[in-house]
Every structure is written in structure tokens, then in C-alpha cells.
Image (tube, rainbow, N blue to C red):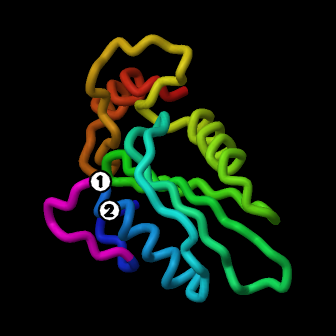
Amino acid sequence: NLLNNPNIKIPEFSDDRTIQELVLNDYLSRVHANAKLIEQRQVRSRLGASLYAVLEPSTTNRPEYLGYLVSRRGNFAYVIQHLQTSYRAKEMQVLLATVAGEINIPSMPPPHVEREHSDLPLFVDLKNSTAEQLAEWKKVARCT
């Protein structure tokens, strides 16, 4: 959740790319402080514009490569990761794209379902919504 996240300070009016880079930088500073960034670029995925990055952590004695796909949907950042013991770029990209294609996010219909609405709600205010508003959001978002 990006709203008031104590680890990621998001400047007002930040675009998706900036937020994706801030999320990746948080991983680099807190989770993989000594990792070497091998590759970073913007890609398209089923989740929309995404940041693809590959890190080489220095925490193990054997080679490891961590692939990341960072996407933003509404007030949430989704981080998909995959670990390889030898860096195979195409395989890393295909695997991350496959996982991204299988993620079920409320308000995002599966790929085989035709979209009936062009701008589905990405989140709902659980604290301030009425029961009727929640029921309507679940219906539109196809939550089960």
C-alpha cells in the first residue's frame, strides 16, 4: 500500500515510473543493500507499464540473480520477483510476465474475460464506504 507508507516517500503528483523506481530503490536499500543492479528498464505487462530490473545479490557464495517486475495500480505497488542461479534474460522476462498475467487483482478482469467497463475502480475506501457501495464495487470488480 503506497498511502502513507513509512518506507517510501512519494512526492505529490508522481507518475507511475517515478513510483516504480522509488519502490525498487526501497528494495535496494532495505532488502538488498549490497546488490548490484544489472539491468533496469520500462516494459509493458498485463499490469500495465512496469519496471523490469535484475539484481545480483552479494549475500550468498553462489551466483544468484533476482528479477523484479514493479507495477502500480491505484494506491498499490505490486512487486513480482523471480530467482535464478544463472542469468537467462529471456527466461527471466517470460517468467515474470507469466506470473504478472496470472495475478488476480480486484477490479482487473482475467485476460479471457471481455471488459465491460473502461475504467474500473482500482480500490475502495473500506473505512468510509457504505455496505451498498462495497457491494457495488465487488460486483463491478468481479470479486467473489
Q: Residues within 10 Å of mark 1 (few under 14, many from 20)?
A: some
* Distance in Å between CA atoms under marks 2 and 1: 5 Å
Label 2, secondary structure: give it: helix
Residue 106 position, x and y percent, is 46, 35
Rendered location of residue 33, percent (x, y): 56, 87
Q: Residue furthest right?
A: 62
Q: Which residues are magenta?
A: 8-16
Question: Can you give x and y, in whole percent of width and height, for residue 42 in the image?
Answer: 41, 51
Please tell me whether mark 1 sits on a helix, a strand or a loop: helix
Question: Which image quarter: residue 15?
Answer: bottom left
Image position of 59 (left or right of 17): right
Tell which of 53 and 102 is nearer to you: 53
Above or below, 100 against 70 in this view is above
Q: Quadrant of residue 34?
A: bottom right
Assign the N terminus to one quadrant of the image.
bottom left
**What residue sits 42% from the left and 67% below the top?**
23
> What residue is shown with label 1?
16
